[in-house]
């Protein structure tokens, strides 16, 4: 019979083929014939990054080949130490192999390579995997409770400042006082809304940060729901009234203090004016002994004291003292005469 020759084909041309023949009498189709193309193993796994902490992880390598692979090999970085594992056949032209990686004492990132061999040769393009040491995430900080009601509450925390590689999830576990788990809430952000809580109940909330399989130490937050929703609303609505009452009391107290100070100062000013007025009256009523010059004692003055109807004459008094001189005294000469100290007191 006739034959079909295919040239310059790759493994994508492999598959089931049929041969059909047609003439004037009939058209016939042959049974399917499988066309297999022989090639070296090829990697079927995209480059992947794995994080390892304190538990072993499994890394899977998948390759395609025909004829089937005879062995799958592994190697760390560029070392000469090569590991071999048994392949697991998925179908006639694809196999997988798995390697268990344990935590290493080294803190450096490592590259794991995987390749296979068959009758056509060794795989040319290796499968690459990056294995990094997963550090324990830093715990959250500054967690605050808000919107606390009788049946719900909100919790918000701050992210740590350390850089994060990979997917980060946040988890809040709500416990009763007897350490019974009440609720488990997961969020892509460090914010949680917990509802369906019991009124007037104390809760303990543990908050975690997870980077893949690695989880941080918990942060403990204590919360207490209110007794009733109505009482909480009444308390909220009464807060402005209480503030107004307090403010009014402060203003009234300040007014009373100002009035008391003003009244005290008014009384002091009034008393000062009264004392000044009394001092002025005493000054006006006091005899001016320095302005008038008393006359010396003479028979005329003595006579004037006994007989108020007789007015003594200054000129006659002077004549008696000076021996009847005809020259009248001057005011300065008159002022030279003064009474003895004893007489001044009685005058």
Image (cartoon, grey):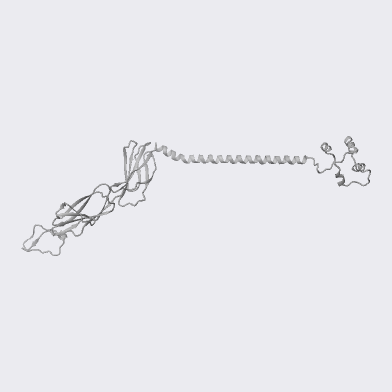
User: Is 258 left, or right, of 28 in this rendering?
Assistant: right
Quadrant for residue 303, please give it: top right
Q: Position of residue 269 (x, y in %)?
A: 66, 41
Closest to the observer: 281 or 246? 281
Occupied quadrant, residue 14? bottom left
Which quarter shows the N terminus?
Answer: bottom left
Q: Position of residue 288 (x, y in %)?
A: 80, 42
Going 73% across and 40% down the picture, which residue do you hit? 279
Residue drawn at the location 20% of the way across and 51% of the way down: 98
Quarter in which the C terminus is drawn: top right
Residue in the foreground of this view, choosing between 258 and 172: 172
Asked which quadrant contains residue 196, the reply is top left
120 vs 242: above or below = below
Would you say 328 lies left or right of 105 here? right
Tag count: 0
Q: Which residue is nearer to you in this view: 327 or 200?
A: 327
Q: Position of residue 314 (x, y in %)?
A: 89, 42
The single residue placed furthest to the top in the displayed view is 306
Residue 195's spot in the image, x, y percent?
Answer: 34, 41
């Amino acid at each position: 019979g006739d034959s079909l020759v295919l040239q310059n084909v790759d493994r994508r041309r492999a598959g089931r083929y049929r041969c059909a023949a047609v003439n004037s009498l009939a058209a016939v189709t042959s049974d399917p014939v499988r066309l297999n193309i022989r090639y070296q193993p090829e990697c079927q796994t995209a480059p992947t990054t794995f994080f390892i902490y304190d538990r072993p992880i499994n890394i899977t390598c998948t390759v395609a080949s025909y004829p089937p692979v005879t062995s799958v090999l592994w190697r760390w970085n560029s070392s000469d130490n090569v590991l071999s594992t048994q392949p697991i056949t998925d179908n006639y032209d694809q196999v997988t192999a798995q390697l268990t990686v344990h935590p290493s004492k080294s803190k450096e990132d490592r590259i794991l390579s995987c390749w296979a061999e068959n009758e056509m040769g060794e795989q040319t393009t290796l499968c690459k995997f990056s294995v990094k040491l997963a550090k324990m995430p830093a715990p959250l900080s500054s967690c605050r409770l808000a919107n606390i009601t009788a049946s719900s509450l909100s919790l918000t925390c701050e992210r740590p400042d350390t850089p994060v590689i990979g997917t980060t999830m946040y988890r809040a576990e709500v416990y009763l006082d007897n350490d019974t788990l009440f609720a488990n809430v997961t969020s892509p952000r460090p914010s949680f809304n917990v509802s369906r809580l019991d009124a007037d109940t104390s809760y303990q909330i543990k908050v975690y940060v997870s980077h893949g399989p690695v989880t941080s130490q918990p942060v403990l937050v204590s919360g207490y729901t209110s007794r009733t929703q109505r009482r909480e609303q009444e308390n909220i609505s009464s807060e402005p009234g209480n503030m107004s009452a307090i403010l009014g009391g402060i203003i009234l107290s300040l007014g009373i203090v100002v009035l008391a100070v003003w009244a005290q100062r008014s009384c002091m000013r009034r008393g000062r004016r009264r004392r000044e007025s009394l001092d002025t009256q005493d000054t006006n009523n006091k005899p001016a002994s320095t302005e008038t010059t008393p006359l010396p004692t003479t028979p005329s003055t003595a006579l004037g004291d006994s007989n108020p109807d007789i007015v003594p004459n200054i000129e006659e008094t002077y004549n008696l003292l000076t021996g009847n001189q005809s020259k009248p005294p001057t005011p300065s000469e008159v002022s030279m005469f003064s009474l003895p100290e004893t007489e001044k007191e009685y005058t």
